[in-house]
């Protein structure tokens, strides 16, 4: 089964080739795969599907796409996007000076150079965290009976002690990300996580990821079934 994008919590993720076409994402045995064509440049596209702000983190081969260091859900800083907006990750670094490109590689050499481990090699990962918003104080209506002295006494007590409800923010960590401040609603678990495994076509065929999809034959129209040769019919 293939699809053009993956929804995970408050975000939707897709991969786009250099020709502007969305790359098919194949679901097989609980994982999503994309065919890694050698030399193909691609971008990661993230669409917010929530009104609140999101912090979006992206990692490829276990490497943070914004800075040259291993990607970490808790320690890495992401990019803040507004509600119902789109974030396009076109390449490595904050200014995307180096494009993402599928390439043949020596697994051990590249993996150890990038992250010190090869377990994340070939994985395109995107995570997002929702923003913690402190609740607004609420005024509790008070009804009372009595003269001005009672009313003044109550007003005086309320003015001295304050009104409304509050929450304990001692476990909330604020993070300075560029020029804005963002506090994650969940400090440890992302609200959305997508992992896409980039593998060559021969591997996808060998593992049956592409096995259920018929091969395209340019000489045979897709809208007609393949028939026997005319010589196979009895035309008498």
Image: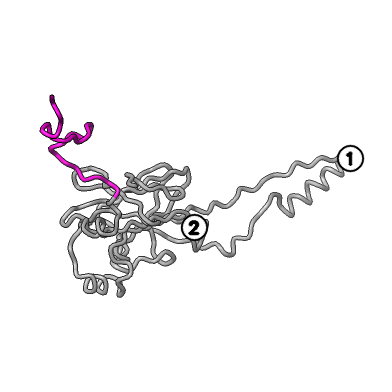
Q: Which residue occupies the extreme right position in the image? A: 146
Residue drawn at (13%, 26%) of the image: 235
Mark 2 neighbour class, 10 Å CA radius: few under 14, some 14 to 19, many 20 or more: many
Residue 152, position in %: x, y? 82, 44
Number of the label disc, if any, that sits on residue 167? none
Q: Position of residue 198 (x, y in %)?
A: 27, 58
Q: Main secondary structure of the magenta part?
A: loop
Q: Residues within 10 Å of mark 1 (few under 14, many from 20)?
A: few
Q: Is residue 227 above or below residue 131?
A: above
Say if 5 sits above or below 188 in the image.
Answer: above
Q: Is residue 69 above or below residue 34?
A: below
Q: Residue 146: give its label.
A: 1
- Name the one closer to the observer, 141 or 124: 124
Which residue does the image show at 64% across and 48% down from the upper left?
137
Q: Which residue is mark 2?
A: 184
Asked if residue 220 is among those painted magenta in the image, a careful observer would answer: yes
Q: Secondary structure at mark 1?
A: loop
Taking the spot 35% from the left edge, 46% from the top edge, the residue there is 5
Q: Can the viewer see residue 180 in this picture?
A: no
Question: Which residues make up the magenta segment?
Answer: 212-236
Answer yes or no: is residue 194 visible: yes
| Residue at the top extreme of this rendering | 236
For residue 154, side relative to residue 91 (left or right): right
Q: How many marks?
A: 2
Residue 163 on image: x %, y %: 71, 50
Q: Secondary structure at mark 2?
A: loop
Residue closest to the eye, 99 or 108: 108
* 19 is higher (above) or lower (below) than 75: above
Question: Does residue 151 appear to the left or right of 63 in the view shown?
Answer: right
């Amino acid at each position: 089964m293939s699809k053009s994008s993956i929804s995970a919590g408050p975000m939707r993720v897709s991969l786009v080739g250099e020709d502007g076409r969305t790359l098919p994402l194949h679901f097989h045995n609980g994982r999503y795969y994309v065919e890694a064509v050698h030399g193909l440049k691609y971008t990661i596209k993230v669409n917010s599907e929530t009104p609140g702000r999101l912090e979006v983190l992206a990692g490829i081969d276990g490497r943070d796409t914004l800075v040259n260091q291993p990607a970490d859900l808790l320690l890495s800083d992401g990019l803040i996007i507004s509600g119902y907006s789109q974030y396009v990750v076109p390449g490595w670094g904050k200014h995307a000076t180096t494009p993402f490109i599928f390439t043949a590689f020596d697994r051990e050499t590249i993996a150890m150079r990038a992250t010190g481990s090869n377990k994340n090699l070939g994985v395109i990962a995107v995570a997002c965290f929702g923003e913690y918003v402190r609740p607004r104080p609420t005024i509790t209506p008070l009804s009372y009976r009595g003269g001005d002295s009672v009313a003044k006494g109550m007003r005086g007590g309320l003015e001295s002690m304050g009104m409304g409800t509050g929450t304990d923010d001692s476990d909330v960590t604020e993070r300075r990300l560029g020029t804005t401040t963002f506090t994650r609603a969940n400090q440890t678990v992302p609200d959305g996580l997508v992992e896409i495994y980039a593998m060559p076509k021969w591997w996808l065929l060998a593992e049956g990821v592409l096995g259920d999809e018929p091969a395209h034959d340019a000489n045979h129209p897709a809208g007609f079934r393949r028939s026997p040769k005319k010589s196979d019919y009895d035309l008498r």
